[in-house]
Image (cartoon, rainbow, N blue to C red):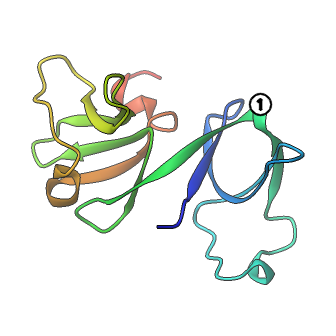
Amino acid sequence: MKTKFRGLVKKESKVYRVIMIDWIYKDIVLCPIGLIITEPKDIPVGATKNFNFKEVKLLPYINIKDKNGKEVYYNDLVKDTKANTYTVELDSKGGLYCLKPTKKGAPEKELVMVKEECETMGNIEEHLHILIPNK
């Protein structure tokens, strides 16, 4: 299994694709998510941005895809077939990824249900307007 990340630039509340992490100098190279890259030579000049670790929150891929085949990452917002919304979070007790309802009283879902009946809407930081109208 290959480890993948997205990077949330805290100042912008915007999520990017992680191209490279330099663990020694604590730098992260990011580019827009929609950019299709198969090899490093495919990256257009000026398409990447460099940040230090303090500026970016790394969001790991949780190795699950939604019902449409889209990759699901930590902090993603997902919607089920009944329009209930959930965030992908870490369970504080077991250290496993789980779905937390965004509204009180919404039914809890097991993470395995994402593959069968949930659709990824994107990262919660970029889609707060869905949860908080007027944002």
Closer to the camera in the image, 15 or 110: 110
Image-quadrant location for residue 96: top left
Q: Residue at x 86, y 47 (%)?
A: 24
Quadrant hosting residue 134: top left
Q: Position of residue 91 (x, y in %)?
A: 33, 28
Seen from the viewer's position, the closer of residues 127 and 78 is 78
Name the residue rendered at 27%, 66% in the picture.
68
Where is residue 43? Give x, y as percent: 77, 75
Q: Position of residue 132 (x, y in %)?
A: 38, 22
Name the element at disc 1.
helix
Using residue 115 as the reference point, say whether residue 27 is left or right of it: right
Q: Name the foreground residue: 81 vs 59.
A: 59
| Amino acid identity at mark 1 | Lys
**Residue position for label 1:** 54
Coordinates of residue 54 in the picture (x, y in percent): 77, 30
Q: What residue is drawn where x is 55% and y is 59%?
A: 4
Q: Residue furthest top?
A: 104
